[in-house]
Amino acid sequence: MAAYLSRLHHISLHVSNVDKVAHELVSRFQFNVFAARLTDRAKQLALRRGSAVFVVNERPSEAPRRLNERQDLNCLYGAHAHYPVDTVSNVCFEVEDVQRASAALRDRGLCEFLQPPTEVADDSGRVTFSIIRSPVGNVCHTLIDRSRYQGLFLPGFHQVRTDSETAGRSQCPITHFDHITYACPRSSTAHITRWYRDTFGFQRFFIDRNEDVDEGYVLNHNGIGLRLTAMEYWKCSESGITLPFKDEQEPDCKFVIAESLPQQGRNQVDTFLDQHRGAGIQHIGLYTEDIVRTAQTLSLSGVQFFSPPPAYYTEVGKQDEIVAAGHDPHALSQYGILLDTDIHTDTDSQRYLLQVFTKPIFREDTFFLELIERRGATGFGEGNIRALWRSVQAYMENEERHETERENKPSKQQ
Ligand SMILES: O=C(O)C(=O)Cc1ccc(O)cc1
Ligand SMILES: [Fe+2]
């Protein structure tokens, strides 16, 4: 049987400069540092906005010198700290019983354990966790049971007092992680979806009504070469129900697998795989209750967004569509926000999806964030996927052109 997940607990980043990335998340993205673990050999900061929690870990620039130098001492609750570039490398889930879940996975030979079930305690109680490797590049999953822990975050972390988290809430109503998008090599999707189904009971989430079960959602024309396959799971209740009864339980963060298709030339998924040196987490969607206000607040604090070509907002019907959704086309165009409308034929009701991508967060192009607001729409709209894709491609091609120009310019010293 699969190990069913109670909920997503936090997402870990491994970066060469914790202070720089934490500062970016605090000053620009309005996250609050609420817990920290600072030792001789570790620097770990926990940051929160709503229920979205990032743990930013300092990654050592070298692999451990001695074999007995345990990497997990550097990074409690994480593993695999050594990686050549800044990366998002762990999605930590709460489970009800780490021992039982780990034993079930081990018995079925489904996954490799980087850390067997381990207990950590402090004055506020104890937690048990284990760490498994995912089939996606450097991504690992920590499984944790914190039901016997009364502290603020996790044992080993101390509380950091900041201004109340509710400050600025109305200006930046980010509430949770909406989805995590993996960039993966060609033909790897089937293996990944099977692994998540067998390991955690994930089910397919169809992006399009006509999507083929095996093929996924394929966009393979007009310069877009992308295969998207989405998966979802349900939060298991505290009452011990361990089967995901769809109707009774709440869906949690979705997972999207992006594969590039070769026919349309080099693209953003290929760039990620090169710069990240392998598959991994390309971006994370942050859910907001008010995308325009959030984009405005983040933009004032220095966050930059990708914009679609300006013609997007003046295309026939787009202005009317935006107005019908209760938005101002000028406000959306100011921040590059995209709108997708899905007319539900059964009820004749309209559902909207609003999204925008931020520019890369790390030095290499190995991670960015997305803002997403859903008005009834639960999936990913085709119009938005195309426009998001194009907004990133236009930026990348521009960057590459500048790079070539810089390389071709004769240097003054010569
Ligand atoms: O629509 C979304 O939010 C996605 O996550 C789909 C997606 C995935 C990868 C890309 O490079 C561009 C778009
Ligand atoms: Fe996304």
Image (tube, helix red, strand yellow):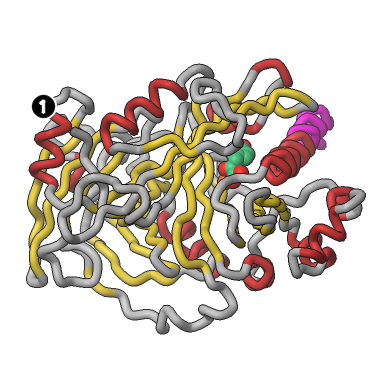
Magenta residue span: 400-414
Q: Is residue 373 above or below residue 315?
A: below
Q: Is residue 404 above or below residue 382?
A: above
Picture quarter with the N terminus = top left
Residue at mark 1: 107
Residue 231 in percent (x, y) is at: 44, 38
Q: Is residue 32 left or right of residue 40?
A: right
Magenta span main SS: helix
Image quarter for ligand 1: top right
Q: Is residue 148 left or right of residue 15?
A: left
Picture quarter with the C terminus = top right
Q: Is residue 403 magenta?
A: yes
Snapshot quadrant of residue 338:
bottom right
* Residue beneath the point at 41% across and 43% down: 232
Camera-nearest residue between 201 and 47: 201
Neighbour class for label 1 at 10 Å: few (<14), some, many (≥20)?
Answer: few
* Residue beneath the point at 50% across and 49% down: 284
Residue 63 in percent (x, y) is at: 29, 33
Camera-nearest residue between 213 and 361: 213
Snapshot quadrant of residue 194:
top left
* Residue beneath the point at 72% across and 20% down: 265
Q: Is residue 302 left or right of residue 62?
A: right
Residue 34 in percent (x, y) is at: 34, 71
Q: Is mark 1 within 8 Å of ligand 1?
A: no
Q: Is residue 277 magenta?
A: no
* Camera sees residue 393: yes
Amino acid at dot 1: Asp
Q: Is residue 99 above or below residue 226?
A: below
